[in-house]
Structures are given as C-alpha cells and as structure tokens.
Amino acid sequence: MNKFFILAIPFLLCSFAGNENAPIDKERYETVKTNVQSQRQKYKVVYQAATLTGKKVVLSEAGKYLHKSLTDTIFSYWYGTKWDFNGYSDKPGEGIIACGYFVSTTLKHCGFNLNRYKLAQEYSLEIVKRISSGDSVLTYRGINAQQFLQKTKGKIQDGLYVIGLDNHVGFLLYEGPEVYFIHSSYFDPVAVVREKASESKAFATSRTFVMCNISSNEKLIKKWILGEEISTR
C-alpha cells in the first residue's frame, strides 16, 4: 500500500458513513443495524488490503465509528425500555430487558459476533473479561463509587467502557469532565438510562469495579471488523 493510500484511509472510511449516527425514529432501527453491518464490511475490505501501518489507521477509525454508533445512535433507541431481572427484549422500547441483556444486545446490534443470551447470563465481571478479548481489564476492589471515580476521572482515556459491578453491568462513558453510567437500571425509573455515574444509585451500591475499553481496544475492534466471535462458555 503506498503512502498516499495510507493517508487517504480516514477520508475513505468517513465517506462510507451514512446518517446512522443521527437520532431517527424507532421504525428505522433495523435500517440502523443494517447500515452498521454494511459499514463493518467496508472496514473489513480496507483492513484486509492494508499494510501494518494502514491497519492501525483502520482500527483507529473503526473505533471512533463504533463509539459514535453506540453512544449517539444504538443506545438512544433503548433509553426508557423497562428493566426486569428476567428481561431479554431484542427490540428497543418494547418488552423488558435486564442489565446483562442490555449490554449484550446493544453490542450485537452494533455488529459484534456474539451470543447475546450466553454473554448476558455470565457474571458481570466475566462479561467484562469476555468483551475485553484479551486486552487489559482495570480492576478496583474494596472502594466506593466516589473513590473509584476519583481514581479514574481525568486519569484514563476518554471513551466508552464496559463496567462490571458487584451485581450489575453496564457502560461507562468518559466524556471530558463527566462520567456517565449507561445501563438498564433496577432503580427509578426502572429502565434503560444514561445518568451521571456520581448520581447513580445502582453505581453507588458497588464496592467492585471491573472495566475494559471499547473505543480504543484494538483486539476487540479487530474482532468486530473481521466478524470474529466474542467467546462465551
């Protein structure tokens, strides 16, 4: 691959992106999922043709795309979907969904190759380990939520993370000065929410915090691009 093509990769990949990151009505959710899969296939073509340097660029651009697709689009459809311990809805805004199923289902709908049932039924900390795909997992035990936030806020890379708590699992979004907890909450409003982690009752109950990066996890992003499976038991 010549130097020009390597430099052109970010612009080429951006040209593939549709408007799936814009808020649209629920009738288009299936279209959003299809568009994400189409985008993944385009990344795959470019990735497989790239040099080692080019592959790094593709992984970086794909990570940004995944981040925006989840935080700006996929999650937004699920906000307000009701929580229940036994919930496993596959359609946002319909039925009920447990915390583990919210994580596994949104990742699957964003194009990850995984069994959403088996992954959701793992213990919260094991879910994080599976999603990490061998990348580093940050573990904090024996501290409260505020101490955890003090240890990590402004000290780790901005981005989207999967986080496992004592008896709960969800996503943490580090975004500038704020940290948001995105999860199917068993506290009021008993539904999928995005809330400040510092104000989350569910977050405050834990003394264990185990998390892995999604946005810049090259091992995970490579799996997404190539359609490789996130293994479960």
Image (spheres, rainbow, N blue to C red):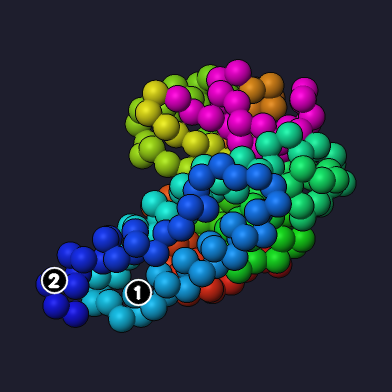
The amino acid on which the numbered mark 1 sits, given as a three-letter code, is: Tyr
Q: Nearer the viewer, residue 59 or 28?
A: 28
Q: Nearer the viewer, residue 194 or 11?
A: 11
In the rendered structure, find residue 47 and report the number of the disc placed on it.
1
User: Residue 198: image x %, image y %?
Assistant: 56, 20
In the displayed structure, does residue 121 sit left or right of residue 183?
Answer: right
Residue at 67%, 32% in the rendered image: 193
Location of mark 2 (residue):
4
- Judged from this view, the residue extending furthest toward the left is 3
- Disc 1 crowd rating (10 Å Cα; few below 14, some 14-19, many 20+) is many
Asked if marks 2 and 1 touch (Cβ < 8 Å), the reply is: no
Residue at 39%, 23% in the rendered image: 177
Q: Quadrant of residue 49?
A: bottom left
Query: Earlier along the polypeptide chain: callout 2 or callout 1?
Result: 2
In the displayed structure, does residue 37 sit left or right of residue 60?
Answer: right
The amino acid on which the numbered mark 2 sits, given as a three-letter code, is: Phe
- In the displayed structure, 26 sits above or below 114; it is above
In the displayed structure, does residue 232 sit left or right of residue 56?
Answer: right
